Amino acid sequence: MEFQRIRRLLSFTRRAVDDYNMIEEGDRIAVGVSGGKDSLALLCALSDLRRFYPKKFELVAITVAAGFPDMDFAPVKEFCESLKIPYIVKESGIANVVFNIRKESNPCSLCAKMRRGSLHDAAKEAGCNKLALGHHFDDAITTFMLNLFKEGRIGCFSPVTYLSRKDLTMIRPLLYAKEDDIAYFVRGNELPIVKNTCPEDKNTERESMKQFIDGLDRKDKGLKHRIFTAMQKGNVDGFKLP
Protein backbone atom coordinates (compact mmCIF):
# COMPACT_ATOMS: atom_id res chain seq x y z
CA MET A 1 0.00 0.00 0.00
CA GLU A 2 1.39 3.39 -0.97
CA PHE A 3 0.82 6.41 1.25
CA GLN A 4 0.69 10.02 0.16
CA ARG A 5 2.78 12.69 1.90
CA ILE A 6 4.74 10.13 3.93
CA ARG A 7 8.28 11.17 2.99
CA ARG A 8 8.64 13.84 5.72
CA LEU A 9 7.05 11.64 8.40
CA LEU A 10 9.23 8.70 7.40
CA SER A 11 12.34 10.88 7.53
CA PHE A 12 11.59 11.94 11.11
CA THR A 13 10.84 8.35 12.08
CA ARG A 14 14.05 6.93 10.70
CA ARG A 15 16.13 9.69 12.30
CA ALA A 16 14.63 9.03 15.74
CA VAL A 17 15.04 5.27 15.32
CA ASP A 18 18.69 5.70 14.34
CA ASP A 19 19.55 8.42 16.89
CA TYR A 20 18.21 6.43 19.84
CA ASN A 21 18.91 2.90 18.56
CA MET A 22 15.24 2.00 18.83
CA ILE A 23 15.21 -1.04 16.53
CA GLU A 24 17.51 -4.05 16.42
CA GLU A 25 17.69 -6.99 14.04
CA GLY A 26 14.89 -9.51 14.66
CA ASP A 27 12.71 -7.25 16.86
CA ARG A 28 9.03 -8.08 17.08
CA ILE A 29 7.40 -4.72 17.74
CA ALA A 30 3.89 -4.18 19.08
CA VAL A 31 2.38 -0.88 17.95
CA GLY A 32 -0.12 0.59 20.40
CA VAL A 33 -3.06 1.62 18.21
CA SER A 34 -5.72 3.72 19.93
CA GLY A 35 -7.44 4.52 16.65
CA GLY A 36 -6.35 8.16 16.82
CA LYS A 37 -4.27 9.97 14.20
CA ASP A 38 -0.94 9.66 16.03
CA SER A 39 -1.00 5.89 16.52
CA LEU A 40 -2.25 5.23 12.98
CA ALA A 41 0.42 7.52 11.53
CA LEU A 42 3.03 5.62 13.56
CA LEU A 43 1.73 2.31 12.20
CA CYS A 44 2.00 3.63 8.63
CA ALA A 45 5.52 4.99 9.18
CA LEU A 46 6.82 1.75 10.67
CA SER A 47 5.07 -0.28 7.99
CA ASP A 48 6.91 1.70 5.31
CA LEU A 49 10.19 1.68 7.26
CA ARG A 50 10.29 -2.10 7.48
CA ARG A 51 10.43 -2.34 3.68
CA PHE A 52 13.95 -0.89 3.44
CA TYR A 53 15.41 -0.60 6.96
CA PRO A 54 18.67 -2.60 7.16
CA LYS A 55 17.63 -4.25 10.43
CA LYS A 56 14.68 -6.54 9.76
CA PHE A 57 11.77 -6.42 12.20
CA GLU A 58 8.15 -7.56 12.53
CA LEU A 59 5.07 -5.56 13.50
CA VAL A 60 1.93 -6.40 15.45
CA ALA A 61 -0.83 -3.81 15.99
CA ILE A 62 -2.60 -3.89 19.36
CA THR A 63 -5.64 -1.96 20.56
CA VAL A 64 -6.79 -1.90 24.19
CA ALA A 65 -10.54 -1.26 23.98
CA ALA A 66 -11.46 0.57 27.17
CA GLY A 67 -15.17 -0.07 26.77
CA PHE A 68 -16.39 3.37 25.73
CA PRO A 69 -19.55 3.23 23.58
CA ASP A 70 -19.66 3.58 19.78
CA MET A 71 -15.97 2.94 19.16
CA ASP A 72 -15.81 0.55 16.20
CA PHE A 73 -12.35 -0.85 15.44
CA ALA A 74 -13.46 -3.00 12.48
CA PRO A 75 -12.09 -0.46 9.94
CA VAL A 76 -8.74 -0.53 11.75
CA LYS A 77 -8.70 -4.31 11.42
CA GLU A 78 -9.30 -4.04 7.67
CA PHE A 79 -6.58 -1.42 7.41
CA CYS A 80 -4.07 -3.65 9.20
CA GLU A 81 -4.98 -6.52 6.90
CA SER A 82 -4.18 -4.29 3.91
CA LEU A 83 -0.74 -3.64 5.45
CA LYS A 84 -0.28 -7.35 6.22
CA ILE A 85 0.12 -6.56 9.92
CA PRO A 86 -1.53 -8.83 12.53
CA TYR A 87 -4.11 -6.94 14.59
CA ILE A 88 -5.18 -7.71 18.15
CA VAL A 89 -8.01 -6.06 20.07
CA LYS A 90 -7.85 -6.59 23.81
CA GLU A 91 -11.23 -5.92 25.36
CA SER A 92 -11.29 -4.40 28.85
CA GLY A 93 -13.66 -2.88 31.36
CA ILE A 94 -11.45 0.11 32.07
CA ALA A 95 -14.16 2.69 31.38
CA ASN A 96 -16.57 0.98 33.78
CA VAL A 97 -13.94 0.77 36.53
CA VAL A 98 -12.83 4.39 36.17
CA PHE A 99 -16.21 6.11 35.76
CA ASN A 100 -18.75 3.81 37.44
CA ILE A 101 -16.96 1.77 40.08
CA ARG A 102 -14.18 4.10 41.22
CA LYS A 103 -15.93 7.32 40.10
CA GLU A 104 -12.56 9.01 39.79
CA SER A 105 -12.40 12.79 40.11
CA ASN A 106 -9.24 12.63 37.96
CA PRO A 107 -10.10 9.71 35.65
CA CYS A 108 -7.33 10.23 33.07
CA SER A 109 -4.52 9.18 35.41
CA LEU A 110 -6.07 5.85 36.42
CA CYS A 111 -7.31 5.16 32.89
CA ALA A 112 -3.83 5.72 31.42
CA LYS A 113 -2.24 3.48 34.05
CA MET A 114 -4.69 0.65 33.42
CA ARG A 115 -4.40 0.95 29.64
CA ARG A 116 -0.61 0.83 29.86
CA GLY A 117 -0.75 -2.32 31.95
CA SER A 118 -3.15 -4.02 29.53
CA LEU A 119 -1.06 -2.96 26.55
CA HIS A 120 2.14 -4.29 28.11
CA ASP A 121 0.48 -7.63 28.86
CA ALA A 122 -0.96 -7.89 25.35
CA ALA A 123 2.43 -7.11 23.79
CA LYS A 124 4.11 -9.88 25.78
CA GLU A 125 1.29 -12.31 24.98
CA ALA A 126 1.86 -11.56 21.29
CA GLY A 127 5.54 -12.50 21.64
CA CYS A 128 6.84 -8.95 21.24
CA ASN A 129 10.02 -7.63 22.79
CA LYS A 130 9.29 -3.98 22.02
CA LEU A 131 6.29 -1.67 22.17
CA ALA A 132 6.06 1.43 19.95
CA LEU A 133 3.93 4.34 21.12
CA GLY A 134 2.74 7.34 19.11
CA HIS A 135 4.07 10.16 21.30
CA HIS A 136 5.46 12.94 19.13
CA PHE A 137 7.53 16.16 19.41
CA ASP A 138 4.65 18.25 20.82
CA ASP A 139 3.73 15.51 23.32
CA ALA A 140 7.28 15.54 24.68
CA ILE A 141 7.25 19.30 25.22
CA THR A 142 3.77 19.24 26.77
CA THR A 143 4.75 16.46 29.17
CA PHE A 144 7.94 18.29 30.16
CA MET A 145 6.03 21.53 30.84
CA LEU A 146 3.25 19.75 32.75
CA ASN A 147 5.83 18.16 35.04
CA LEU A 148 7.51 21.52 35.55
CA PHE A 149 4.36 23.57 36.14
CA LYS A 150 2.20 21.04 38.00
CA GLU A 151 4.74 18.97 39.91
CA GLY A 152 7.76 21.24 40.17
CA ARG A 153 10.14 18.70 38.66
CA ILE A 154 12.24 18.27 35.55
CA GLY A 155 11.08 15.19 33.69
CA CYS A 156 9.46 13.62 30.66
CA PHE A 157 8.81 10.21 29.17
CA SER A 158 11.95 8.67 27.67
CA PRO A 159 12.64 8.03 23.98
CA VAL A 160 13.52 4.44 24.94
CA THR A 161 12.49 2.76 28.18
CA TYR A 162 13.28 -0.78 29.30
CA LEU A 163 10.66 -2.30 31.61
CA SER A 164 12.59 -4.94 33.53
CA ARG A 165 9.51 -6.45 35.19
CA LYS A 166 7.98 -7.11 31.77
CA ASP A 167 11.22 -7.60 29.82
CA LEU A 168 9.75 -5.14 27.33
CA THR A 169 11.30 -2.06 25.73
CA MET A 170 9.11 0.94 24.92
CA ILE A 171 10.12 3.12 21.97
CA ARG A 172 8.72 6.37 20.59
CA PRO A 173 9.67 6.60 16.89
CA LEU A 174 7.62 9.76 16.22
CA LEU A 175 9.67 11.78 18.70
CA TYR A 176 10.91 14.22 16.04
CA ALA A 177 7.58 14.55 14.22
CA LYS A 178 5.50 17.61 15.04
CA GLU A 179 1.75 17.29 15.38
CA ASP A 180 1.37 19.44 12.25
CA ASP A 181 3.49 16.93 10.30
CA ILE A 182 1.24 14.10 11.44
CA ALA A 183 -1.93 16.05 10.63
CA TYR A 184 -0.56 16.84 7.14
CA PHE A 185 0.09 13.13 6.53
CA VAL A 186 -3.33 12.11 7.83
CA ARG A 187 -5.09 14.63 5.58
CA GLY A 188 -3.46 13.06 2.53
CA ASN A 189 -4.55 9.51 3.33
CA GLU A 190 -7.87 7.90 4.16
CA LEU A 191 -6.88 6.49 7.53
CA PRO A 192 -9.59 4.77 9.62
CA ILE A 193 -9.60 7.27 12.49
CA VAL A 194 -11.77 6.11 15.39
CA LYS A 195 -13.41 8.96 17.28
CA ASN A 196 -12.66 8.87 20.99
CA THR A 197 -15.98 8.84 22.89
CA CYS A 198 -14.45 9.26 26.34
CA PRO A 199 -16.33 12.12 28.10
CA GLU A 200 -12.99 13.60 29.26
CA ASP A 201 -11.49 13.79 25.78
CA LYS A 202 -10.09 17.30 25.04
CA ASN A 203 -11.04 18.40 28.56
CA THR A 204 -7.80 17.76 30.39
CA GLU A 205 -4.85 19.56 31.95
CA ARG A 206 -2.72 18.20 29.11
CA GLU A 207 -4.93 19.82 26.48
CA SER A 208 -4.88 23.15 28.38
CA MET A 209 -1.09 23.05 28.60
CA LYS A 210 -0.83 22.20 24.91
CA GLN A 211 -2.94 25.24 24.00
CA PHE A 212 -0.85 27.41 26.35
CA ILE A 213 2.43 26.31 24.72
CA ASP A 214 1.01 26.74 21.22
CA GLY A 215 0.07 30.31 22.13
CA LEU A 216 3.57 31.07 23.44
CA ASP A 217 5.16 29.55 20.33
CA ARG A 218 3.04 31.73 18.06
CA LYS A 219 4.29 34.83 19.90
CA ASP A 220 7.89 33.64 20.13
CA LYS A 221 8.69 31.50 17.09
CA GLY A 222 11.02 28.62 17.75
CA LEU A 223 10.15 28.30 21.45
CA LYS A 224 9.16 24.65 21.14
CA HIS A 225 12.39 23.76 19.37
CA ARG A 226 14.44 25.54 22.03
CA ILE A 227 12.65 23.63 24.79
CA PHE A 228 13.24 20.33 22.97
CA THR A 229 16.91 21.17 22.40
CA ALA A 230 17.29 22.03 26.09
CA MET A 231 15.80 18.63 26.97
CA GLN A 232 18.41 16.95 24.78
CA LYS A 233 21.33 19.02 26.06
CA GLY A 234 20.23 18.49 29.65
CA ASN A 235 19.71 14.76 29.09
CA VAL A 236 16.20 14.89 30.51
CA ASP A 237 15.21 11.24 31.01
CA GLY A 238 17.47 9.88 28.28
CA PHE A 239 16.92 12.60 25.67
CA LYS A 240 20.63 13.25 25.20
CA LEU A 241 21.80 11.79 21.90
CA PRO A 242 24.18 8.81 22.26
Image: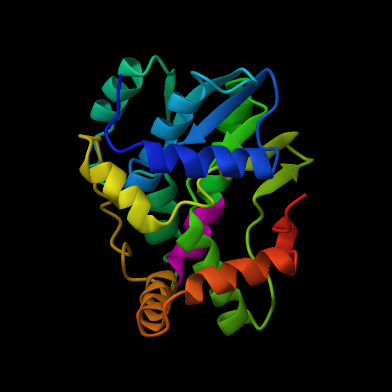
Q: Which quadrant of the structure image shows residue 33?
A: top left
Query: In screen coordinates, is 187 left or right of 33?
Result: left
Q: Which residues are magenta?
A: 106-113
Depth check, front residue: 111 or 162:
162
| Residue 111 drawn in magenta | yes
| Residue 183 spot, x, y in % from top left | 29, 51
Up/down of 227 relative to 192, above or below:
below
User: Residue at 63% across / 20% down in the picture?
Assistant: 54
User: Residue at 51% across / 40% down in the picture?
Assistant: 13
Up/down of 50 relative to 205, above or below:
above
Depth check, front residue: 10 or 37:
10
| Residue 112 spot, x, y in % from top left | 50, 55
Depth check, front residue: 25 or 95:
25
Query: In screen coordinates, is 151 left or right of 224?
Result: right
Q: Which quadrant of the structure image shows residue 194?
A: top left
State the predominant SS element of the stretch in magenta. Answer: helix
User: Residue at 59% across / 44% down in the picture?
Assistant: 16
Up/down of 56 relative to 19, above or below:
above
Instruction: Count up the numbered dots.
Output: 0
Up/down of 12 relative to 233, above or below:
above
Q: Which quadrant of the structure image shows residue 150?
A: bottom right
Residue 154 in view in this figure: yes
| Residue 228 spot, x, y in % from top left | 58, 67
User: Residue at 24% across / 35% down in the picture?
Assistant: 192
Considering the image in quadrants, where does the N terminus appear?
Answer: top left
Query: In screen coordinates, is 14 left or right of 130?
Result: left
| Residue 202 drawn in magenta | no
